[in-house]
Image (cartoon, rainbow, N blue to C red):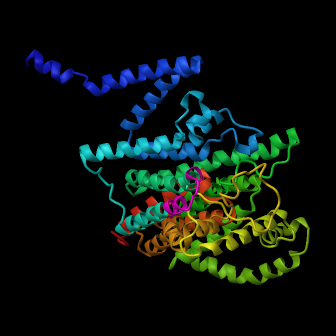
């Protein structure tokens, strides 16, 4: 072998050299611009993380991103009353770089969004060089068609709003979580391969929920009594989706596996329920109850469904009597009934009254453009004033609590149907795949895919929906799993 050949074979190439120069330049800039010794480590740490993600299997990188988004708290968690030692990292994950680092002005992307772009680039690079990875298939055509309609409706609503004098900044804010959900779906669709390996992502969701449940319990029963500061919630509203879907994952696994490992899985269920109780969000209990109802609807032919149906019929008269007796009672024994009444009766809960006022204003605001909507970049019209909340939530007219009515207002009925179609696809995929599933894992996935649509749909109706980061991760993960499941069971191609 000649010296030239040896040199060519061992040459580091231009890319590593450029990468080293970029890291060196970024380190020097960070030291000079931020004036803090710790800042000099940031470029090296980021470069190491990028190298690790580029080398690791995409499924591992996607799973790590999902875990970080779902599990980490930030400085706004628990209304800023308390935060864990990892809250600084949570800020980087959840908030824009320019809001955290003075030297990062002009970088409006969050750490999550930067990671999504990077992982999509890694997936595209690997696909171009090596072809599609073994076991990775394109999403079914129906999923791609729904995705195209989804993005088209969002784009049209943005154009419609800006053409009518809407604010570009508001339009970006309103649609950012919708676009992030679509991008995360592409990441998970490229990462998932089907089979037992993907079940680990479900385990990561449960692990993240356990971390948040411990955090919620600590804040509710340790921090709040110490400080005396009243908190309506222990972590945030978005954890209702996380706790509920994690609990449904455990229940679905237990229903379908029925082996010795089920007892181990069920051990974590009480902890998740404690997290729901500590976070004191009424919506979570409703999400859990209706998620279990979805299980009963989807699981046609399952033996446990027949057993549960008979038990429900026997218990129904007692439940009706319990509800009637407790509807007007304040006794602790009737707290489940009081919970249902507080959600439905505005005379017993001021928050419910405020939401009903906002819902009425949203519905009346639709009258000026009932077909194509106002477009993103606009506000809803406050025809009837509710409680003053500008001081604590100044975006309330551009970011409705009821995102279902908000989408109907901004995107119009046709746009709403297209934007809402992915959730309908989840229910359809779960219901059609369950009877064709060959393994307990596939059947459990079918149940949870369908239930996820109901859980996030309730969150959209009750409290901001897509604006919680849990929505994007859980919805995108469910959509990717639904696509793999539909392909594996022959439901779609």
Give x and y (percent) for residue 256. 52, 66
* Nearest the eye: 442 or 262: 442
Q: Is residue 264 visible?
A: no
Query: Which residue corresponds to the image point at 82% horizontal and 56% vertical from the top-left?
Result: 388
Give x and y (percent) for residue 393. 74, 51
Query: Which residue corresponds to the image point at 53% horizontal and 39% vertical from the top-left?
Result: 111
Q: Quadrant of residue 359?
A: bottom right
* Nearest the eye: 69 or 174: 174
Query: Which residue corresponds to the image point at 62% horizontal and 50% vertical from the top-left?
Result: 209
The total number of labels drawn is 0
Label the magenta part by its dominant secondary structure. Answer: helix
Horizontal side of residue 486 vs 100, given as left or right? left
Horizontal side of residue 256 vs 287, given as left or right? left
* Nearest the eye: 65 or 203: 65
Range drawn in magenta: 157-170
Can you name the residue that lies furthest to the left here? 2
Q: Quadrant of residue 399?
A: bottom right
Give x and y (percent) for residue 193. 37, 55
Q: Is residue 286 visible?
A: yes
Give x and y (percent) for residue 351. 80, 62
Does the segment drawn in magenta span residue 163?
A: yes
Q: Quick one: quadrant of the N terminus? A: top left
Horizontal side of residue 260 vs 492, given as left or right? right
84 is higher (above) or lower (below) than 189:
above
Q: Quick one: quadrant of the C terminus? A: bottom left
Does the segment drawn in magenta span residue 103?
A: no
């Amino acid at each position: 072998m000649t010296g030239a050949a040896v040199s060519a074979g061992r040459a580091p190439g231009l890319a590593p050299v450029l990468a080293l120069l970029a890291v060196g330049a970024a380190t020097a800039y960070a030291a000079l611009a931020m004036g803090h010794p710790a800042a000099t480590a940031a470029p090296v740490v980021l470069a190491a993380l990028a190298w690790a993600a580029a080398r690791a299997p995409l499924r591992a990188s996607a799973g790590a991103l999902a875990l970080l988004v779902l599990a980490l708290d930030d400085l706004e968690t628990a209304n800023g009353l308390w935060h864990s030692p990892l809250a600084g990292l949570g800020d980087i994950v959840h908030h824009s770089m320019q809001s955290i680092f003075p030297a990062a002005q002009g970088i409006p992307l969050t750490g999550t969004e930067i990671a999504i772009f990077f992982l999509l680039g890694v997936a595209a690079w690997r696909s171009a060089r090596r072809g599609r990875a073994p076991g990775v298939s394109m999403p079914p055509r129906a999923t791609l068609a729904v995705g195209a309609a989804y993005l088209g409706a969002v784009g049209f609503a943005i154009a419609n709003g800006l053409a009518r004098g809407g604010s570009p900044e508001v339009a970006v804010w309103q649609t950012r979580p919708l676009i992030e959900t679509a991008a995360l779906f592409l990441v998970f669709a490229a990462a998932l391969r089907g089979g037992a390996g993907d079940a680990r992502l479900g385990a990561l969701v449960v692990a993240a929920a356990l971390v948040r449940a411990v955090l919620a319990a600590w804040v509710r029963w340790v921090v709040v009594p110490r400080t005396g500061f009243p908190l309506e919630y222990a972590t945030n509203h978005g954890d209702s989706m996380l706790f509920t879907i994690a609990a449904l994952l455990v229940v679905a696994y237990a229903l379908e596996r029925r082996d010795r490992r089920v007892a181990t899985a069920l051990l974590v269920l009480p902890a998740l329920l404690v997290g729901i109780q500590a976070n004191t969000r009424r919506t979570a209990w409703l999400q859990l109850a209706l998620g279990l109802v979805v299980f009963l609807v989807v699981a046609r032919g399952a033996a446990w469904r027949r057993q549960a149906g008979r038990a429900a019929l026997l218990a129904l008269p007692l439940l009706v009597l319990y509800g009637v007796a407790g509807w007007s009672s304040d006794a602790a024994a009737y707290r489940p009934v009081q919970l249902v009444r507080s959600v439905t009766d505005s005379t017993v809960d001021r928050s419910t009254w405020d939401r009903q006022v906002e819902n009425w204003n949203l519905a009346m605001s639709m009258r000026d453009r009932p077909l194509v909507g106002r477009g993103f970049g606009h506000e809803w019209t406050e025809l009837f004033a509710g409680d003053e909340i500008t001081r604590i939530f100044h975006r309330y007219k551009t970011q409705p609590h009821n995102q279902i009515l908000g989408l109907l207002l901004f995107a119009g009925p046709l746009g709403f149907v297209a934007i809402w179609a992915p959730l309908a696809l989840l229910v359809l995929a779960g219901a059609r795949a369950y009877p064709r599933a060959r393994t307990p894992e596939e059947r459990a996935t079918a149940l949870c895919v369908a239930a996820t649509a109901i859980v996030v749909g309730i969150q959209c109706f009750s409290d901001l929906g897509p604006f919680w980061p849990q929505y994007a991760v859980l919805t995108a993960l469910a959509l990717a799993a639904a696509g793999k499941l539909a392909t594996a069971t022959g439901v779609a191609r």
